[in-house]
Image (cartoon, rainbow, N blue to C red):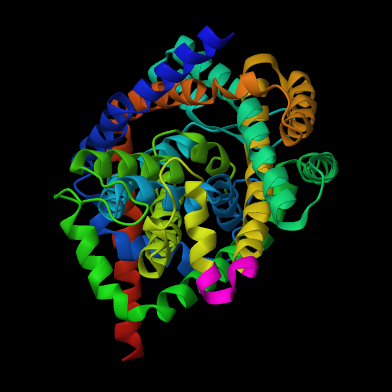
Amino acid sequence: MDVVNHWVEVLSKWIWGAPMIILLLGGGIFLTLRLKFFQFRFFVHAMSQTVGRIFKKTDHLDGTLTPFQAFTSALASTAGATNIVGVGVAIAIGGPGAMFWMWMVALLGMASKYSEIVLGVKYREKNKEGEFVGGPMYYIRKGLGWRWLAVLFAFGLMLEVIPSSMVQSNSISSTVKSAFGWPVEVTGLIVTILTAVVVFGGVKRIGKVAEKIVPTMVLIYLLGAAGVILMHLDRLPMVLGQIFIHAFTPISATGGFAGASVILAIRWGMARGAYSNEAGMGTASIAHATAQTDHPSRQGLWGVCSVTMDTLVICTMSGLAVLTAGTWNQVEQGGDLARAVPMAFGKLMGAEMGGVFVSVFLLVFVMTTVGVLIYYGEKQAEYLFGLTFSKWMRLIYILSMYAGAVGGLKFVWQFLDILLAMIVVPNMIALLLMSKEVKEETDDYIRNIYLMEKRAKKEMENKGA
C-alpha cells in the first residue's frame, strides 16, 4: 500500500504541476484570443447584467433555477477553504509574487468559465423529472459526438465527488474540534444529517439554500478581511509593491519564510487561482445549465462575475490580509501553513477569536460546497446509469461525509487530484475544439441582444429628453 500511495502522490504532483498549468493557462489564452478579449471588453456589461440584475424576475424564461440561484450554487462549490486558508498557504510558500500570478490565471480563466457555461446552456436538456440538466458530458456528446470522452468526464466526476466530500467533511470536523473541542464523531453526524436535509430537497432546495447563505457569509468574511487590512493600512503600498516586484524577481528568506524563486511564485499562484475558481473544470456549467435565461451568452456572463468574486475579490482580500498583517512569513515552513489567515484575523480580534471566526466561515462554506458537489456527482450518475442509480449515489455521497469526518478510508483521498485531472482534460479539449461555437453564440448575443438593448435604451433616453 505504501508503494501505491507513493506513486499516486508522485503522479498527482506531476499532473498538477506544469502539465495542468499549461493546459489551463494556455487554454485560457487561446479562448481569450478567440473571443477577442470578450471578458475585458464587456466586463462592465457583464457586471451590470449579473449583480446589477440580481432581483430581476425570470419566471417567464425556460429553466429550473433563477440565474442568481445558479450563480450562488456554482459559487458555493468554489468558495471555501481554498479561498481562505489556501491563499495563505500559497503566499507562505511562493511569496507575495504568487498573488500576481493568481490574478493572471483568473483574468484568463474568465474566458474558459464563460465558454463552458455558454456550451452548458446551449446543449442542456430536460430529464424525466422535468428539470434542466447539462454540463460537459452533454456538450461533449452532442457537440463533438465523442460519447467516450463524455463518459470519461462523467465517470471521473462521479467518482471524484466521493474523496472530495470526504476531504471537505474532514476539514469541518478537524476545524470544529480545534475551535470548540467537539468530538469528530459528533460533528460528522451533524454534518451528515444537515447535508442529507439539503441534498434530498433536490436542485431547487440547493439553489435556495445557496442563494440565502453564500452572499451573506461572503459579505461578512470580506468585511472581516477589510478590517485586518485597514488596521495595517500603512503597509498596503509596500505590500502591493512586493506583489508586483516578486512576481518577476526572487525573494529571500525572512522570518519563518524560506524564500521563493519566480518559478515557485508562478507555480503556487497559478495553481491556487485555477483551483479556487474551477475555471476549465466544467463543473460550473452543470449548475448554470439549470438557469432561467433567454440566451446562453447572457448566462455565460455569470462566469465572468463568478471568477471576479471568487478569485479577484475573496482570494485577494485573504491574500492582502496575511500580507499586510505580516503573518505570511511568521508560520514555519513544514509546519501548519494554514495558520497564516487565522493569525491575521487574530491581529484584529485576538488570537482565539480570530481562529474561531475563520473556523465558523470554513464550516459554513464547506457545508454549502459539499451540497453542490453531491448534486454534481448525482448528475454524472444520472447521465451514465439513469435517474434511479443517481439516487443511490446520493446515499453513498452522504455516507462518505461521515466516513471522512471521522478520518476513515484515507487511502481514497490519495486519488483526488488524479480524478480531478480526469475531468479537466476532457473539458478543456471540448472547450478548445468547440470554441468556434462559443464565438458564434457570443457574436449572436452582441448583435441581436446587446446592441439592440443598447439602441432601445438610447431611444428611451432621447424620448425622455
Name of the residue lying farthest toward the bottom? 465
Q: Residue at x 31, y 81 (%)?
A: 234
Q: How many marks?
A: 0
* Residue 32 % position (x, y): 23, 43
Seen in the picture, residue 220 relative to 440 is either above or below; the reply is: below
Residue drawn at point x = 24 percent, y = 59 percent: 243
Q: Is residue 301 above or below residue 219?
A: above
Quadrant location of the C terminus? bottom left
Place residue 264 in its image quadrant: top left
**Start-end of magenta stretch:** 346-353
Residue 348 drawn in magenta: yes
Our reading of the magenta stretch's main secondary structure is helix
Residue at (30, 74) in percent of width and height: 236
Q: Position of residue 271 (x, y in %)?
A: 36, 39
Q: Is residue 415 left or right of residue 12?
A: right
Look at the image and say whether residue 48 sits in the magenta stretch: no
Q: Position of residue 349 (x, y in %)?
A: 58, 75
Q: Looking at the picture, does residue 397 appear above or below residue 181?
A: above
Residue 211 in sight in this render:
no
**Name of the residue lying farthest toward the front:** 255
Residue 53, image x, y percentages: 50, 67
Res. 232 image quadrant: bottom left
Q: In screen coordinates, is 209 left or right of 280? A: right
Residue at image location 48% in from the left, 77% down from the top? 227
168 vs 215, nearest the viewer: 168
Whether residue 277 appears in this view of the structure is: yes
**Quadrant showing the N terminus:** top right
